[in-house]
Image: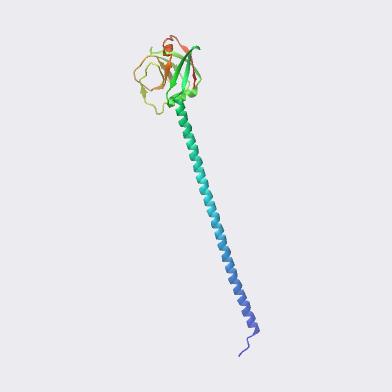
């Protein structure tokens, strides 16, 4: 048998060690990569969950705000159905009006208190010009006024107190009904001042 050269054996051992080292290095590297990938995936899952949670919370808050606003609006509408105003004629005689539940009445209520000068018109109603127009959104195009009606005539921008019945009129909108004291307006012959304010 031939002798194995010691140098050859040493080189072989070194090569084996190198190969084993490379294999171990690759295994460790791949293991580390897998851990990094798992960590990144966990972070992505956490971020996704946070985004979903935030979106759900925002939607919940928006829905709550919307519900609160709708509730507030509905509550205002219910209150308006029982709202009364007081008309003080020439500083001493009081007339009470129960308002209708519509947008024009709401706009009028926001103007109060007001002091206006009334005059007679057509021997049927007393009228006074408002400082601003009222919204007539969602109301009929007109109506037939009756004695005791408190109304708004859009083309002229005036309010009216009817002390006599009248025919159907376009662009006339009912704001409320006088509870008592219509005759006070009917008996006024000249121009007169009326202070209008909310009662409840």
The image shows residue 96 at horizontal and vertical percentages of 45, 17
Say which quadrant the N terminus sits in: bottom right
Which residue is most to the left? Answer: 167
Colour scheme = rainbow
Give the residue at x 55% y 59%.
38
Q: Write down the quadrant of residue 36 in the picture.
A: bottom right
Give the number of marks: 0
Give the residue at x 51% y 48%.
52
Q: Write down the quadrant of residue 12 in the picture.
A: bottom right
Q: Is residue 147 left or right of residue 20?
A: left
The image shows residue 71 at horizontal and vertical percentages of 47, 33
The image shows residue 63 at horizontal and vertical percentages of 48, 40
Relative to 164, residue 71 above or below: below
- Pick the front one: 120 or 83: 83
Q: Is residue 43 left or right of residue 164?
A: right
Q: Is residue 111 left or right of residue 174?
A: right
Give the residue at x 57% y 61%.
35
The image shows residue 125 at horizontal and vertical percentages of 40, 14
Which residue is most to the bottom? Answer: 1
Relative to 147, residue 26 above or below: below
């Amino acid at each position: 048998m031939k002798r194995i050269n010691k140098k050859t054996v040493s080189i072989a051992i070194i090569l084996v060690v190198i190969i084993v080292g490379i294999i171990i290095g690759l295994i460790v590297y791949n293991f580390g990569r897998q851990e990094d990938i798992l960590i990144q995936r966990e972070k992505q899952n956490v971020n996704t969950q946070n985004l979903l949670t935030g979106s759900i919370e925002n939607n919940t808050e928006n829905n709550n705000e919307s519900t609160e606003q709708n509730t507030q609006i509905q509550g205002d509408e219910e209150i308006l159905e029982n709202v009364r105003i007081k008309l003080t004629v020439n500083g001493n005689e009081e007339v009470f009006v129960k308002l209708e539940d519509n947008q024009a009445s709401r706009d009028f209520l926001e103007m109060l208190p007001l002091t206006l000068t009334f005059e007679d018109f057509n021997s049927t109603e007393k009228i006074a010009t408002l400082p601003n127009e009222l919204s007539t959104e969602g109301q009929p195009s007109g109506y037939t006024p009756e004695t005791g009606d408190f109304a708004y005539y859009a083309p002229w921008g005036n309010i009216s107190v009817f002390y006599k019945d009248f025919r159907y009129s376009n662009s006339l909108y009912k704001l409320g009904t006088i509870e008592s004291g219509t005759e006070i307006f009917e008996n006024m012959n000249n121009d007169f001042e009326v202070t209008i304010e909310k009662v409840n």
